[in-house]
Amino acid sequence: MEQLIFSENFTPKQAITEVIKNNKRQKYNPQRFINMMDAKDNVQLISKIEGLIVSSEEKALGTLLSQIFEKKYILTIEDFVLLFGETWDMSPNAIQTAQDRVKLFDECARGQRFDMKIV
């Protein structure tokens, strides 16, 4: 399990950057994610994150699951929504879906991938 620590004023934009950096380090191409998260402002970005989580394509989710199974420590936007979703004023549905997905991702990784904390 990898420990990750973030400040309490961590932003959605910073989360996107962290996901992209992590995915590249893990040799997982985040280009589709990068294209989907192009936003003019924080409100639009949160809307895009919620849309991605709530209505994710099965094919894209399947690809992500297989990569997590293979590489284990792939960081996802769901990991951040689980931690910061309420702070970012995300919908309860998006937060619940993120929680369900993080559980699924951890199962695919055969154990908890990250211990994420706010300081």
Image (spheres, rainbow, N blue to C red):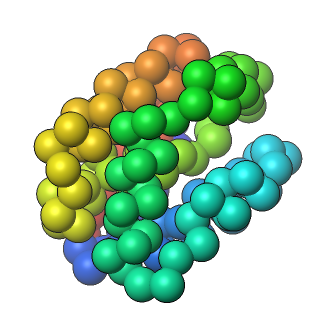
> Who's the residue at 39% across and 73% down the image?
44
Is residue 64 at all visible to an observer of this figure?
no
> Who's the residue at 15% across and 43% down the image?
92
Q: Position of residue 35 (x, y in %)?
A: 69, 63
> Who's the residue at 63% across and 41% down the image?
74
Q: Quadrant of the C terminus?
A: bottom left
Is residue 33 at all visible to an observer of this figure?
yes
Total numbered badges shown on the rendered structure: 0
Q: Position of residue 113 (x, y in %)?
A: 51, 34
Question: For residue 28, what is the image quadrant?
Answer: top right
62 to 1, vertically: above or below: above
41 to 108, vertically: above or below: below
Left or right of 18 in this view: 88: left
Q: Residue furthest bottom?
A: 40
Q: Position of residue 18 (x, y in %)?
A: 57, 65
Question: For residue 34, what is the image quadrant?
Answer: bottom right
> Who's the residue at 63% across and 39% down the image?
73
87 to 64, vertically: above or below: below
Left or right of 113 in this view: 44: left
Question: For residue 24, what is the image quadrant?
Answer: bottom right
Left or right of 7 in this view: 33: right
Q: Position of residue 80 (x, y in %)?
A: 38, 54
